Image (spheres, rainbow, N blue to C red):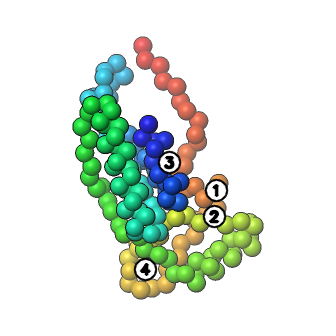
Amino acid sequence: MMAQEIYAIAEKHSGVCTIGSCTTKPGIVTSVVEECAITLDQRHLDAVKLAAMWQDAQDAARRFASECKVDVAFGDLWRIEPILFHKELTEFADEAIKETVGKSWRLPSGPLHDAAEVCRAGIPTQMLFVQSLKGISHIKSRTRRKSISR
């Protein structure tokens, strides 16, 4: 339920939401789940819209928890405010990509990691990613594996 909800939240706000992991305890196939923890990555270039996405995700989780009569808690693993890449460099990169492959997909994300610190220091910054299907990066095959317990 939550995965479907976060994709709807992303679409509503023109951002990106991804559940990176889902861990259950005790994690035994034949046991009822006692605890479930998910990690959520949300990205948007607008801080207000990013905050609204986070609020919507929390509201959805609270709604599901209430319906299922379970507790829910929230925390941050890591948080960074939206930082914009250098506008002119972004346009140059976009032109180069379009010239090379005909279409450019922009990720709704600013610089992270080292690029964020370079950008914060006032140095014009831009990152290019290898063109991927509809701008989706870090994705594995959507083929599902079936597991059988005996």
Relative to residue 128, is residue 103 drawn left or right?
Answer: right
Measured in 3D between alpha carbons, the distance from the residue under mark 1 to the one under mark 4, in whole angstroms, is 26 Å
The vertical placement of 30 against 59, above or below, is: above
Could you tell me which secondary element the residue under label 4 belongs to? helix
Residue occupying image coordinates x 47% and y 75%: 84
Measured in 3D between alpha carbons, the distance from the residue under mark 3 to the one under mark 2, in whole angstroms, is 18 Å
Q: Which label's residue is closer to the chain start, 1 or 4?
A: 4
The label nearer to you, 4 versus 3, is 3
Residue type at mark 3: give it.
Tyr
Task: Give the label on residue 105, or none.
Answer: 2
Residue that mark 1 sits on? 134
Task: Give the label on residue 7, or none.
Answer: 3
Residue occupying image coordinates x 32% and y 59%: 78
The label nearer to you, 1 versus 4, is 1
The label nearer to you, 2 versus 4, is 2
Place residue 67 in its image quadrant: top left
